[in-house]
Image: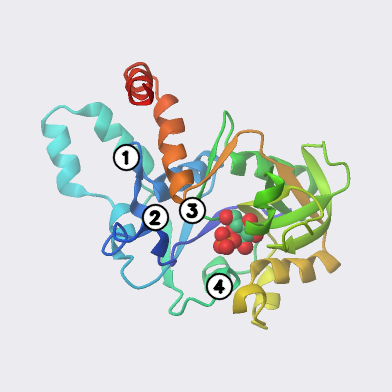
Amino acid sequence: MKRIRKAVFPVAGLGTRFLPATKAVPKEMLTVVDRPVIQHVVDEAIAAGIEHFVFVTGRNKGVIEEHFDKHFELEATLRSRGKTVELRQLEQQTPAAGATSFTRQQEPLGLGHAVWCARDIVGDEPFALLLPDMLHHGKVGCMAEMIKAYEAKGGNHIGVYPVRDDETHQYGIVDVAGSADKVAKIKAMVEKPARGTAPSNLAISGRYILQPKIFELLATQERGAGGEIQLTDSMLKLAEAEPFYAVRFDGKVYDTGSKIGFLAANVAYGLADEKLAPEFRAVIKDILG
Ligand code: G1P
């Protein structure tokens, strides 16, 4: 069985829901507590043992590349001022030289197209895919759990979590055999089902482990829901030939692509920060009156 070494991060989205914040700053660089959203997701991949980080970027996303570079002058300044905690944190969170790749999506043709843009960099091996909008907050990282499931079963894996019935139309939805199991075989998958037609309330959480055959299927580039090249359509085809498992994430998932999800993530991550929590809790209480 091939190890999961590479992770793909599609970061080409325009972020129109966060204008004017995202006019000059990519939405992935908006901060949740003390680090950009994309850093939280890369941290999750690092914790899962990922060794190479592939970013599918677009116009005006250059600052993401800067963010994951070594900042020599900053590190020298921190060292000379004896700021060892900050220095160590920077060092731990910066991927090693040669461990990042950046490619451009060029046109906003959908998630399937963004993933396909990473085909040459990923090559002929299974890979992790993490959608940066979705923050997974739990004791164990979602991707670490999924890699464990992959090592036990092989095949393809999708992270899922339960959503409310009135939210299913916003997500990819899967139906599984043995719905209470942590890891369950997927029976059906549908991208953004019309209201009232979802086969279950298990939403695709934006975490995937996919076999490289997905690139051949994406290469046909057929348009699906919303006129976009959908990843879910190619996964459905792949599922005819290879097993797909759903890995249920037991922590909380925050969709930071929406304002409410973004605010909720800041509250949750702030309250989970030991140093900030006591004062932050008092401030929230005060605001709520
Ligand atoms: C994408 C996927 C969808 C998934 C969602 C999670 O949709 O196509 O299956 O549930 O991410 O955020 P998007 O949010 O890009 O419309």
Amino acid type, mark 3 = Pro
Of residue 124 and residue 41, the one placed in the foreground of this image is 41
Closer to the eye: label 3 or 1: 3
Helix, strand or loop at label 4? It is: loop
Which residue corresponds to the image point at 82% horizontal and 55% vertical from the top-left?
199
Q: Amino acid at mark 4?
A: Gly
Rendering coords of residue 36 (x, y %): 36, 47
Tell me if I can see residue 41 in this picture. Answer: yes
Query: Tag on residue 110?
Result: 4
Question: Which residue was labeled with disc 3?
Answer: 132
Q: Nearer the viewer, residue 16 or 122?
A: 16
Q: Position of residue 192 (x, y in %)?
A: 68, 62
| Marked residue nearer the N-terminal end (3 or 1) | 1
The residue depicted at 70 percent of the width and 52 percent of the height is 158
Q: Earlier in the sequence, mark 1 or mark 2?
A: 2
Residue linked to disc 1:
91
Q: Are marks 2 and 3 in contact (CB under 8 Å)?
A: yes
